[in-house]
């Protein structure tokens, strides 16, 4: 795709403008860090374009504070005060059940994930947001807590121009097949390889 020019133009009956403005399903997967970071960078562009942004974190504990959340909450306040950018909502769906299952049973976490997806499906039907960041949503799909087939059907039928970004490792093959854009983060080198732990401002 040199200089932003498509490699081929499909014979789909759409104009260049119609094709350009088609809503996208984007997946950031792979073993390396940066999947969520890239999604939040995209959300920054969307905010600047005046889009309504909805972030839904399916892995992070409600007690886990990330720098991006504070930044987007500040941007939401800027929007409310000045009209610049767009509104932002940030929701946490779990208690950190992907990394340390300390509270609640697997059934509890599965139910919470299903409830979180049900809320997103409701918002998609109502065209609430322009961009949805479903952070670490690949995990409940991979574990079977949320039905991938049902998710893909809902995403395929979503009305209007609603972009969806899903992040996380082990994204189901069916999700990769359905996505318009797939990025796989591959590790070349990481500070943890040399025994360095994560640090504020880099990992969170």
Image (spheres, grey):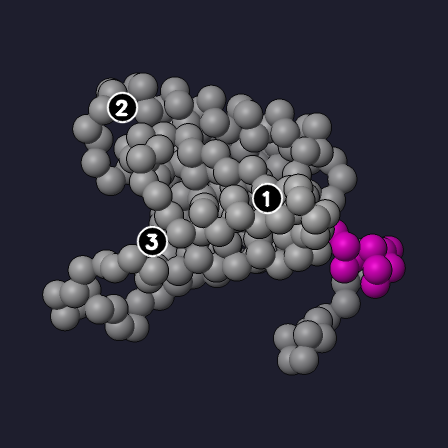
Q: Crowding near pointer 1: few (<14 within 10 Å), some, many (20+)? A: some
Q: Crowding near pointer 2: few (<14 within 10 Å), some, many (20+)? A: few
Residue 7, above or below 146? below
- Identify the residue shown where x is 33% and y is 62%: 202
What residue would you read off at disc 2? Answer: 106
* Magenta-colored stretch includes residue 18: yes
Q: Nearer the viewer, residue 11 or 81?
A: 81
| Label number found at residue 77 | 1
Q: CA distance from mark 1 to mark 2?
A: 36 Å
Q: How many marks?
A: 3
Residue 37, above or below 118? below
- Identify the residue shown where x is 76% and y is 39%: 160
Relative to 116, 193 lies left or right: left
Which residue appears farthest toward the bottom when viewing the image?
A: 2
SS for callout 3: loop
SS for callout 2: helix
**Are discs 1 and 3 less than 8 Å apart at CB?**
no
Q: Crowding near pointer 3: few (<14 within 10 Å), some, many (20+)? A: few
Q: CA distance from mark 3 to mark 2?
A: 26 Å
């Amino acid at each position: 795709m040199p200089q932003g020019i498509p490699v081929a133009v499909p014979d789909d009956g759409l104009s260049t403008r119609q094709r350009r403005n088609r809503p996208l399903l984007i997946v950031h997967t792979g073993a390396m860090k940066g999947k969520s970071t890239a999604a939040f960078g995209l959300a920054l562009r969307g905010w600047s374009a005046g889009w309504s942004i909805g972030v839904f974190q399916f892995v992070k504990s409600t007690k886990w504070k990330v720098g991006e959340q504070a930044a987007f909450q500040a941007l939401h306040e800027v929007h409310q005060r000045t009209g610049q950018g767009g509104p932002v909502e940030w929701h946490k769906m779990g208690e950190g059940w992907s990394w340390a299952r300390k509270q609640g049973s697997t059934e509890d976490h599965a139910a919470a994930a299903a409830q979180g997806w049900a809320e997103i499906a409701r918002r998609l039907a109502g065209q609430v947001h322009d961009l949805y960041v479903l952070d670490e949503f690949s995990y409940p799909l991979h574990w079977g807590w949320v039905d991938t087939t049902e998710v893909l059907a809902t995403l395929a039928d979503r009305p209007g121009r609603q972009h969806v970004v899903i992040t996380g490792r082990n994204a189901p093959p069916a999700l990769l097949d359905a996505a318009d854009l797939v990025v796989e983060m591959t590790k070349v080198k990481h500070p943890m390889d040399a025994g360095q732990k994560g640090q504020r401002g880099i990992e969170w």
